[in-house]
């Protein structure tokens, strides 16, 4: 089976065998679904059924952490929440861009409570250190796991971890796990994770989490990471009933990340892509709205609505044993980099 990327979309070259046939089916069904639902037109159709009162809230006094918040969906979500009065913690990798975003958000919202934190989400030890310090100095009501990457060539971090997995999965796992004690202290605590509809073409592959086997493809690695985020959310919801967990797909949005990581896809689809604000809408709704919590914890959302995490007849369901193994593996990996809080 050969995997290629055409127009930024995962495509499986058809070769004899049921695995290739199934992958072709998944990709075809997913793309047709995306053209109907993930585009700007899909958002506009869904928005006709939104309830405006859902976001008529004042969240002054509540604290929101948003990773990858210097641009794109993260920045759009930060601005929307800032306009509602929330204290915003922008967690970003580089210094210059988040400081510019901070100034823009303050100017546009009139909210001065916008803080910048520098953190590399691919560095497990740094994440632990950051989270331990943060908990001693701040309260936290809502964590938005938005930061992510799509590296199209297999790269290892300085810790020897494949970069997509390190950022999208292990980093998300460590930050969330480390901050859960702070979240559990607060009323109406929430964790929102920004996933992708691309995960629908992937079944959890517990045997190759860091893509060491076969031909590496960044788009497929990203989709696998996003499947893992969905499973993490489902599992967290079972274990931590005091916190409301959700995971969502923003649709196909025109963001700097899409332009840089998927240039062919962007060129072909740019007139149909959602705005950053449209992509961020469900993030904001899940982070703010009382209406969101009428739904069960642990669900996957698209345009303010819980949707299935599997395509019909796509054979992407994983066993309970594999899902438990994912959590066990992440816990074991994370503990290698954990530090005692009394050493900070």
Image (spheres, rainbow, N blue to C red):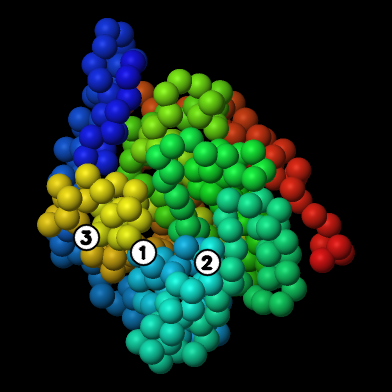
Give percent across and percent down for residue 246: 46, 55
Tag 1 near tag 2, CB within 8 Å: no
Residue 181 horizontal side relative to residue 306, left or right: right
**Residue 325 versus residue 19: which sits nearer the camera?**
19
**Residue 163 versus residue 278: which sits nearer the camera?**
163
Kindly report the distance in space between the C-alpha atoms of the residues bearing marks 1 and 2: 17 Å
- In the image, residue 47 sits, relative to residue 270, either above or below, namely below
**Can residue 188 be seen in the rendering of this structure?**
no
Kindly report the distance in space between the C-alpha atoms of the residues bearing marks 3 and 2: 26 Å
**Residue 37 versus residue 57: which sits nearer the camera?**
37
- In the image, residue 326 sits, relative to residue 282, either above or below, namely above
Give percent across and percent down for residue 243: 58, 60
Tell me the crowding category of disc 3: few under 14, some 14 to 19, or many 20 or more residues within 10 angstroms, Cα based: many
Disc 3 designates what residue? 274
Q: Residue at x 59, y 72 (%)?
A: 117
Disc 2 designates what residue? 94
From the image, state whether disc 3 or disc 2 is nearer to you.
2
Q: Residue at x 38, y 53 (%)?
A: 248
Helix, strand or loop status at disc 3: loop
Give percent across and percent down for residue 155: 52, 39
- In the image, residue 259 sits, relative to residue 276, either above or below, namely above
Total marks in image:
3
Give percent across and percent down for residue 60: 50, 86
Q: Earlier in the sequence, mark 1 or mark 2?
A: 1
């Amino acid at each position: 089976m050969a995997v290629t990327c055409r127009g930024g979309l995962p495509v499986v070259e058809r070769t004899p065998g049921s695995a290739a046939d199934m992958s072709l089916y998944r990709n075809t069904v997913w793309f047709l679904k995306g053209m109907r639902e993930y585009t700007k037109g899909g958002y506009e159709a869904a928005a006709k059924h939104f309830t405006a009162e859902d976001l008529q809230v004042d969240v002054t006094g509540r604290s929101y952490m948003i990773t990858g918040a210097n641009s794109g969906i993260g920045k759009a979500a930060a601005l929307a929440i800032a306009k509602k009065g929330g204290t915003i913690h922008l967690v970003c990798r580089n210094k210059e861009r988040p400081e510019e975003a901070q100034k823009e958000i303050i100017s546009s919202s009139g909210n001065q409570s916008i803080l910048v934190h520098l953190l590399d989400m691919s560095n497990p030890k740094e994440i632990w250190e950051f989270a331990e310090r943060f908990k001693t100095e701040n309260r936290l009501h809502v964590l938005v796991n938005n930061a992510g990457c799509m590296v199209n060539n297999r790269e290892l971090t300085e810790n020897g971890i494949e970069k997509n997995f390190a950022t999208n999965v292990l980093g998300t796992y460590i930050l969330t796990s480390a901050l859960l004690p702070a979240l559990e202290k607060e009323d109406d605590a929430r964790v929102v994770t920004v996933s992708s509809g691309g995960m629908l073409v992937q079944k959890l592959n517990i045997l190759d989490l860091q893509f060491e086997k076969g031909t590496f493809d960044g788009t497929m690695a990203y989709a696998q990471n996003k499947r893992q985020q969905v499973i993490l959310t489902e599992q967290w919801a079972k274990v931590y009933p005091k916190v409301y967990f959700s995971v969502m797909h923003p649709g196909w949005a025109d963001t700097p990340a899409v332009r840089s990581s998927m240039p062919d896809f962007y060129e072909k689809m740019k007139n149909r892509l959602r705005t950053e604000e449209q992509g961020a809408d469900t993030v904001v709704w899940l982070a703010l709205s009382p209406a969101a919590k009428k739904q069960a914890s642990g669900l996957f959302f698209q345009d303010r609505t819980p949707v299935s995490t599997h395509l019909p007849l796509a054979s992407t369901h994983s066993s309970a044993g594999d899902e438990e193994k994912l959590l066990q593996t992440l816990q074991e990996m994370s503990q290698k980099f954990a530090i005692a809080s009394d050493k900070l």
